Image (cartoon, rainbow, N blue to C red):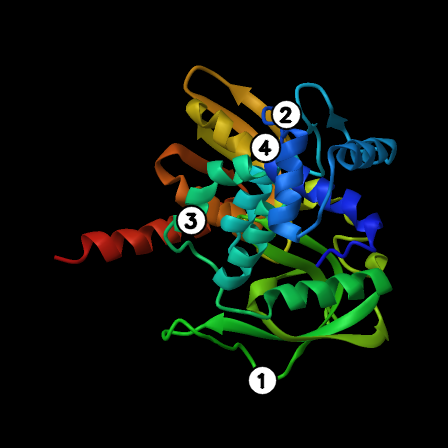
Amino acid sequence: MYTSGNKKMLNMLILEILRNYTDENHALTQQEIIKLLDQKYGAPCDRRSVKANILSLKEMGYDISMESGYRLLSREFDDAELRILIDSVLFSKSISTKQAKGLIEKLRGLGSKYFNAKVSHVSNLPELQHTDNKQALYSLDVINDAISSKRKVSFTYNEIGTNFKLRKKKEAPYIVNPYQIVANNGRFYLIANVDKHDNVAHFRVDKMTEVKMLEDMIKPMRQVKGLENGLNLPKHMAEHIYMFSGDSIYAKVRADRFLMTELVDWFGKNFQILKENDDYIELRVLINEKAIRFWALQYGPYVEILEPLSLREQIKEDITAMSEKYLGRK
């Protein structure tokens, strides 16, 4: 609570009022600020003090207009930026519903009452898909510290059982060398190396529990297959569109021409067009072998894997198995 002997707080209270009640399109008069100071904080003030404190805030670098009333013109995040951040939290599958609601309320607190009026419907949306793992944010924090300190981490890795709850995938904890956390399809993944292997592995953070930073230093990237020259994140993400682990291969693909936008959405610009006509495009792309297999099945009628032949044969087997399931049943 504001006390009359602590006048240094007054400019901060006025700043808080400007944040909550003004923006570039809405201003407050001196009398309105005085009234809000009394109502919200029990802080007596006069017109001269309001002006003096706002001038002090302007000297401190705050972008406050004094024309036709007082308004805070710029803040840490503008309305569009706040909306992007709120949507990112809302549709994140890596944090619990309770945590998502808490974060959204904090973000809304950075905007004015006029911004909050525009996004008031957010709290009324139906439940979206969020993880039940309440340790997810804590796990992110521990992993970030471990990456910064170049130390290994251990964790229990889980899967979802038929009761829709997490259960241990195996009893023994995983011990990994953490290198990078990335976001993909609304989830956080850890790019790492399992300590007893020499290849890259990916782990969903929302499937981790009991995450601990260890004292042991991480294995240098140059000792990990695929990371010998460091982690090229855009290239790595383009090769691992579903975040599967395993080797990348060069695949030759024929796709219907109308899929060009989808090709860029999935692979970025990291593919080479070998041939094109009015009907189709032939391209070569470096990609995780398991990922391109599932991607080809996803776009089945519109794409064809030409090379490698081993992958082409695997997809033939997949199609045959699918056909037997659907056509073999009455």
**Which mark's residue is nearer the viewer, 1 or 2?**
2
Name the kind of residue labelled 3 in the image. Ile
Mark 1 or mark 2: name the one nearer the start of the chain: 2
Q: CA distance from mark 3 to mark 1?
A: 34 Å
Work out whether mark 1 precedes mark 4 in sequence or the reverse, and give the earlier one: 4
Check the image and report above or below for 180 versus 254: below
Q: What is the number of the mark on residue 24?
A: 2
**Residue 287 higher or lower than 56, as above or below:** below
Q: Secondary structure at mark 3?
A: helix
Q: Nearer the viewer, mark 3 or mark 1?
A: 1
**Badge 4 local density, few (<14 within 10 Å), some, or many (20+)?**
few
Residue at 85% in and 75% down: 216
Residue behind mark 1: 171
Q: Nearer the viewer, residue 272 or 221?
A: 221
- How much space separates mark 1 and mark 2, taking CA atoms? 57 Å
Residue 230 shows up from this direction: no
* Label number found at residue 315: 3
Q: Is residue 281 visible?
A: yes
The residue indicated by pointer 4 is 80
Residue 302: percent from left, percent from top: 38, 33
Q: Amino acid at mark 2?
A: Glu
Q: Nearer the viewer, mark 2 or mark 3?
A: 2
Sequence-wise, the earlier of marks 3 and 1 is 1
Question: Disc 2 to disc 3, how far (Cα)?
Answer: 58 Å
Numbered disc 1: secondary structure = loop
Q: What's the residue type where badge 4 is placed?
A: Ala
Mark 1 or 4, closer to the camera: 4
